[in-house]
Amino acid sequence: MEKVLITGAAGFLGSHLCDRFIKEGYHVIGMDNLLTGNLDNIAHLFRLKNFEYYHHDVTKFVYIPGDLHYILHFASPASPIDYLKMPIQTMKVGSIGTMNLLGLAKDKGARILVASTSEIYGDPDVHPQPEEYWGNVNPIGPRGVYDEAKRFMEAITMAYHNFHSVDTRIVRIFNTYGPRMRLDDGRALPAFMSQALRGEDLTVFGDGSQTRSFCYVDDLIEGIYRLLMSDYHLPVNIGNPNEISIRQFAEEIIALTGTNQKIVYKPLPQDDPKQRRPNIDKAKQLLGWEPKVGRAEGLKITYEYFKNKIQQR
């Protein structure tokens, strides 16, 4: 049984990755320091013989006994509300944490996939964003701690690939949603859904004309799995190219939840991207991947999850 280490295992994406690799027959080691993760997301796995959990901060030395075949590095605060509150931890996990895991991959002869982000494109002046675009990032703005941590992650990953011949993969993740997102995540979808379910007006920043592209989590996990198993080491966008304005998205949430809330507008945060849409030509050509779950279907599943969570509070 091949062994895979998944960091950030108790988070939104990490927990879904744990499920996928258990399903595929791997021995999964989930690692998390629970800075933003929640053990409830992986509680159902603790009874399994082929799952282990290590409570550990990857910015400290990472030790895994025995063989290790794959590493997926998903440890990091990922929403603005988190990385604005924890800027130094965000930069450390993207830099020191990534170096520790690349060193582990080198030592074990393991293949490593690192979770980069569409945020490396910053506030883009190319649309949609292809992998060849270098981005438009403010390194000293409030979002710079996350953007630059991920840009460094990509650079150090390529350095280990080129200098030490480490077998690496880089996924650039665009906006993703689905069950196990936190209610207080701060991003558009959980914010809108939790506000609607609590009977509050929906808060839109700016005039709502800025766009996002939302990918359902099952589609994203499939793309990540295919990329890991491919032989391509350069960055690949994984996301849904179906673009929508934030104002339209808020209106969709109000219609879905059947509430009568209004939309209220607040000033746009500094360096907030005006457009976000992936060019997924590479994923289609190299991985045979494209999203399958439509937004209406994905939102309905996610709404049921949020409704249950709010009722439990």
Image (spheres, rainbow, N blue to C red):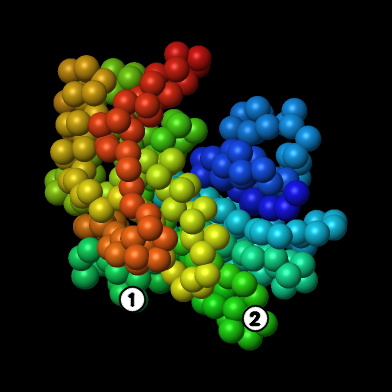
* Residue 252 sits above or below residue 291 on the image: above
Q: Which residue is mark 1?
A: 132
Q: Secondary structure at mark 2?
A: loop
Q: Residue at x 50, y 14 (%)?
A: 312
Determine the residue located farthest toward the bottom in the rendered image. Answer: 163
Crowd around label 2: few <14 · some 14–19 · many ≥20 (10 Å): few
Q: Is residue 268 above or below residue 204?
A: below
140 to 288, vertically: above or below: below
The amino acid pointed to by label 2 is Ser
| Quadrant of the rendered image containing residue 16 | top right
Where's residue 92, x and y in %?
61, 63
Can residue 188 be seen by looking at this rendering? Answer: yes
Q: Is residue 254 left or right of residue 35?
A: left
In this picture, residue 60 sits left or right of residue 223? right
Residue located 65% across and 27% down the image: 44
Front in this rendered view, residue 6 or 307: 6
**Three-letter amino acid code at disc 1?**
Glu
The image shows residue 162 at horizontal and vertical percentages of 59, 84
Q: Residue at x 61, y 29 (%)?
A: 40
Q: CA distance from mark 1 to mark 2?
A: 22 Å
Is there any visible trace of residue 202 in the rendered image? no
Residue 96 in picture, x, y percent from top left:
65, 67
Which residue is located at x 37 percent, y 26 percent?
A: 301
The residue that label 2 is drawn on is 165
Residue 27: horizontal and vertical position, in percent?
A: 73, 45
Name the one closer to the observer, 262 or 154.
154
Mark 1 residue element = loop
Mark 2 or mark 1, which is nearer the start of the sequence? 1
| Left or right relative to 269: residue 177 | right
